[in-house]
Amino acid sequence: MSLKEAINLEKLPKHIAVIMDGNGRWAKEKGKNRIFGHKNGVGSVREVSEACAELGVKYLTLYAFSSENWNRPKLEVAALMELLVRTIGNETKTLMKNNIKLMTIGSIETLPSRAQEQLAKVKEATKNNTRLTLSLALSYGGRAELVDAFKKIASQVKKGEISEGDITESTINKHLYEPSIPDPELMIGTSGEYRLSNFLLWQAAYTELYFTDKFWPDFDKESLYEAILAFQSRERRFGKTSEQIKS
């Protein structure tokens, strides 16, 4: 039986989030520059997106560029932005073919204008697609998302639109960058790094974490199947006991 056949389609994670790490180290091992790694990482984005759509996963969020990544060398950042513009344009046909809707989270307004325009164009073209929602986290930081949410809530309190007593977890959820996307059930981190990297901090409260030593450019469909099978082997208790879950 193949890995794909072993997956229980009735117990798929509805939302998978991925920290795509290791492009630079992958390139370094091959004696290439970091941009070579980022370019090859695009293939993994395509493979994982298609695999999720084929299986029936409804949401996929990819950590493409963090707010901290702006501190990288200027040439690398510029090359990454150019790669983003080119890739989004080139992958539009693939998104349409697979009925995938593109969304973004993060401080998109900080991206170069060309990147913003390309993203807006593809988001508009794919807005009615229903098979999979692919969300790119760009110029994104989990702490910044929470700060922005708290500021919006504080403003509402100041205006008298809500009171402090009205604030609940649901209130915070409604003020996140994209409240329509459910919390991830599975988060995958590549390249042997064991950390959340400031990614979906609020949403990942009960997310199952899966880490692999594979660099992102080596992460393919089979790698995704392995992660999903690991997820399906776990017991998700959400603070309850095993006996409560089974009863």
Image: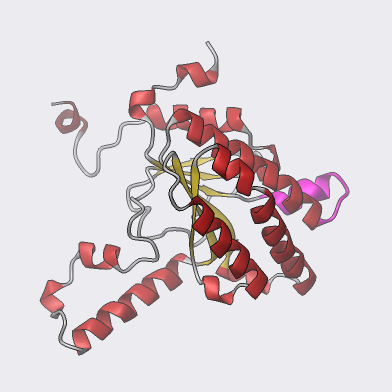
Where residue 191 sits: x, y (%)?
A: 64, 45
Most distant residue in the bottom direction: 158
Where residue 54 sits: x, y (%)?
A: 50, 30
29 part of magenta stretch:
yes
Q: Quadrant of the C terminus?
A: top left
Most distant residue in the right direction: 31
Viewer-nearest residue: 91 or 128: 128
Viewer-nearest residue: 96 or 116: 96
Q: Residue at x 63, y 41 (%)?
A: 46
1, above or below 221, in the image? above
The answer to which image quadrant residue 186 occupies is: top left
Where residue 32 sits: x, y (%)?
A: 86, 51
Q: Which residues are magenta?
A: 22-33
Q: Is residue 179 found left or right of 161 in the rendered image? A: right
90, above or below 85, in the image? above
Image label count: 0
Where residue 99 sits: x, y (%)?
A: 50, 40
149 part of magenta stretch:
no
Viewer-nearest residue: 221 or 203: 221
Q: Residue at x 51, y 57 (%)?
A: 123
Visual colour scheme: secondary structure
Q: Residue at x 37, y 70 (%)?
A: 146
Q: Is residue 108 visible?
A: yes
Viewer-nearest residue: 126 or 139: 126
Q: Residue at x 33, y 25 (%)?
A: 10
The answer to which image quadrant residue 178 occupies is: bottom left
Q: Is residue 188 found left or right of 181 in the rendered image? A: right
